[in-house]
Image: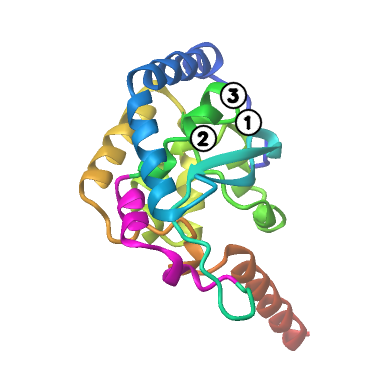
Amino acid sequence: MGNTHKPYGIYEKFIKRPLDLICGLLVLVLFCWLYLIVAVLVRIKLGSPVLFTQDRPGKDEKIFRLYKFRTMTDERDENGKLLPDNVRLTKFGIFLRKTSLDELPELFCIIKGDMSFIGPRPLLVAYLPYYTEREKLRHTVRPGLTGLAQASGRNTVDWDKRFEMDVKYVENLSFLMDMKVIGMTIKTVIGHSDQVAEDTRMIEGNFAEIRRERLARTGKLEKEQD
C-alpha cells in the first residue's frame, strides 16, 4: 500500500473537522480556568516560558508548531549545557505528564486545524526520512491529541507496533473508531501509567537512530551475502 489516503466516509469527509472545531471551542470556554491555573503553577514551579514549543509534521507532512505546557526546568551544568531530561523533570512535571495536563495547549492546534482530537501522535520532524511507505500513511490524516497507539500503551509500545496501529487507525477511520480511542485513552490516563515520558527516547530509543542502525545492519548483511 502506498502513502496515499482519500477520505472514504461521510464522517471523515464532512463531520470530523467541524466536530473538532466545535468541541475545541467548547472545551476552551468551559476549562479556561484550568488553563490559567496550570499556567500559573508552571510559571511558579518551572519558570518561564510557560509553554514548550516544537515543530512537528502534520497532515501531508506539513510542518506546524506544537504547543505544550513545559514539564522540565532549564537547569544547566557548569559549562552551560542542559542537564539530562531525567534530572530536569520534576515531580510536578511528572504529575503533568501522568494526567496529560501538559498537553492542554494542543487544543489551540486543534482549533487552528493543524491537529485533531483523535489521530496518530505528531512526532519529530527528524523522523520523516525513516518511515516505510506503509508507515507514511500516518501523515495522510491530521495528527491527534491522542491516538490508537498512545491509548494502547502510551510510550510502552515499541516503534514498529505503534506505527502499525497508526496505519490501522487510518485504514479504519470512523466515528466508532474515534469513540473507541477516547474510551481507551480515558482508561490509560486514569490508570496513571508509569511510562509517561514526552521524549520517547527515554523509553524505547530515538526512532531515527534505531532505523539508521537497522538499515546499516541490513546493508552489512547484504554485502556479506554477496
Which residue does the numbered mark 3 point to in the structure image?
A: 113
Which residue does the numbered mark 1 point to in the structure image?
A: 5
Residue 170 screen position, x and y as percent:
51, 35
Work out how far the residue at label 1 is from the one at label 2, CA to CA, in angstroms. 8 Å
**Residue type (three-letter) at the residue carrying disc 1:** His
Give the mark nearest the N terminus, 3 or 1.
Answer: 1
Look at discs 2 and 3 and give the one toward the viewer: 3
The answer to whether residue 122 is left or right of residue 224 is left
Q: Which stretch appears magenta?
A: 82-99
Work out how far the residue at label 3 is from the one at label 1, CA to CA, in angstroms. 18 Å
Residue 188 screen position, x and y as percent:
27, 46
Quadrant where the N terminus sits is top right
Which residue does the numbered mark 2 point to in the structure image?
A: 170
- The crowding category of the residue bearing disc 1, from other C-alpha atoms within 10 Å (few below 14, some 14 to 19, many at least 20), is some
Give the mark nearest the N terminus, 2 or 3.
Answer: 3
Q: Which mark is residue 178?
A: none
Give the mark nearest the N terminus, 1 or 2.
Answer: 1
Q: Is any atom of residue 204 visible in this view? A: no
The residue under the point 36% across, 62% down is 90
**Residue type (three-letter) at the residue carrying disc 3:** Gly
Q: Quadrant of residue 183?
A: top left
**Residue type (three-letter) at the residue carrying disc 2:** Val
